[in-house]
Image (cartoon, rainbow, N blue to C red):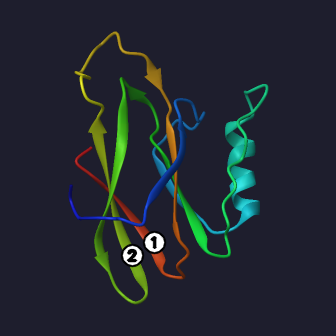
Amino acid sequence: MAGEKMEELVLVTNDGYSGIAQFDVMAIRDTKSLNKFYSQINKTRKPGLPVPMIDFSHEMAIVVCMGEQQGLVEPLLSKINETNEELTVAVELSKVDGQEKNEDAPISYPFYLYKMPASSKTLNFQKVGW
């Protein structure tokens, strides 16, 4: 891990298809923004994925869209730097155990949704080791 483990970070859900072709990380601080994200990933799904319940009065969400991936990978999030105004989070790629670089592996566009205690700090995300 590039930084310090984020003990307060909890994986809420993940899925192998987001429909988002490029890497993107976003902090979501309200229900409207979470619903907007889910409406985007549910465009090609019938029925769509249910929107998770997050209490935005106490929590916030972090969505990691991995972009196009071949084989099974997952993000590792760690705290690099924290000040009174901002938090810098490293996003590393981790191969799932037993997965080697395989030309026959399916291509996916996974996303991961995490929750953590609400914070007014500005969140900055850095890709590490991609």
Q: Nearer the viewer, residue 47 or 21?
A: 47
Residue under pointer 1: 123
- Name the disc covering residue 48, or none: none
Q: Residue at x 58, y 67 (%)?
A: 60
- First-in-chain label (2 vs 1): 2
Instruction: Give the percent coordinates (x, y) of residue 64.
Output: 48, 49
Whether the residues at callouts 2 and 1 have beta carbons within 8 Å, the answer is yes
Residue at image coords 43%, 87%: 85
Mark 2 is on which residue type? Leu
Left or right of 96 on screen, residue 120: right
Measure the C-alpha gap from mark 2 to mark 1: 5 Å
Which secondary structure, mark 2?
A: strand
Residue at point 63% right, 69% down? 29
Crowd class of label 1 (few under 14; some 14 to 19; many from 20; radius 10 Å): some
On the rendered image, what quadrant is the C terminus found in?
top left
Would residue 97 appear left or right of 26 to someone viewing this image?
A: left
Left or right: residue 94 compared with residue 44? left
Q: Is residue 47 above or below residue 57?
A: above
Q: What's the mark number on residue 87?
A: 2
The x and y percentages for residue 20 are: 57, 38
**SS for dot 1:** strand
Check the image and report above or below for 123 versus 41: below
Report x, y in % for residue 90.
31, 60
